Image: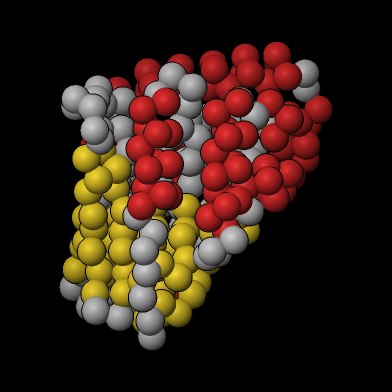
Amino acid sequence: MRTLFIGDLHLSADRLDITHAFIRFLDTGLDGAEALYILGDLFEVWVGDDIAAPFALELAEKLKQVSHKLPVYFIHGNRDFMLGKRFARAAGMQILPEITCLKLYGVDTVILHGDSLCTLDKAYQRFRKLRSFALARWLYGCLSKKRRQGIADKIRRKSKSSNKQKSDTIMDVEPNAVDALFAQTHTQHMIHGHTHRPAIHQLDNGNKRIVVGDWYEQGSVLSVSPEGINLIRLPFDSAPLPHDPAQ
């Protein structure tokens, strides 16, 4: 009996090796799992359900098969916040609120993507606030497919360039934001991704902050069971893969 968490796969047509590794995980790595939670950035970029690439549609079919065996939950990330109900239905995924609380084997736990905790990155937080408006997302969805793709490509290039100039402190979660979320949700454990820094942090107050890893060079799965918490590495079959520093 266990619950699995993954995030930051950043799947794209340019990195089908990651997609294949993920499919292998779905085929062989779910034994004993009660649920699978995807904590955002499943895709490198998502500009609308109506522009889903062929590999994404194939993955949706695989996830749909998985959903017949156990529930699959999804929380939006900063790269796939436009993923909508249409694709979620096709993939058998249940979209959860940005911040979701659950009791995990008796422990009150809050789960989220994690970008909201990086409050020192002021420029990104301004963009995040803008994209949170339903009107802004609706207007973006009204644009042509070509225009949406162009905007997404431009944002991604700008993000890569700016991230190279940001310090590690700015790119990581801010401790006060972590403490505030714990206080707001009255939880003892927090699980998130986004920072690509897998770890289990034991905090001074007894709480735990657990970070799932990305899938650039290997798979990363968090397994939570009544017996404990385990971060699992899933080596790819191929040679070591290049690391993309963009978040």
Q: What x and y, as percent, mark residue 242? A: 25, 22
**31 to 186, vertically: above or below:** above
The image quadrant that residue 129 belongs to is top right
**230 to 235, vertically: above or below:** below
Residue 178 visible in rendering:
no
Report the residue at 45% width, 79% height from top.
103
Quarter of the image that includes the C terminus: top left
Please give the count of numbered marks on the rendered protein. Answer: 0
Report the residue at 34% width, 55% height from top.
29
| The furthest residue to the bottom | 106
Report the residue at 78% width, 37% height from top.
138
Viewer-closest of 158 and 34: 34
The image quadrant that residue 157 belongs to is top left
In this rendering, would 56 be left or right of 138? left
Viewer-closest of 205 and 64: 64
The image quadrant that residue 143 belongs to is top right
**155 to 87, vertically: above or below:** above
Residue 70 visible in rendering:
yes
Q: What x and y, as percent, mark residue 130? A: 63, 38
Viewer-closest of 104 and 141: 104
Q: What x and y, as percent, mark residue 240? A: 19, 27
Report the residue at 42% width, 26% height from top.
16
Tell me the colour scheme of the image: secondary structure
Quarter of the image that includes the N terminus: bottom left
| The furthest residue to the right | 142
Q: What x and y, as percent, mark residue 61? A: 60, 43
**18 to 165, vertically: above or below:** below
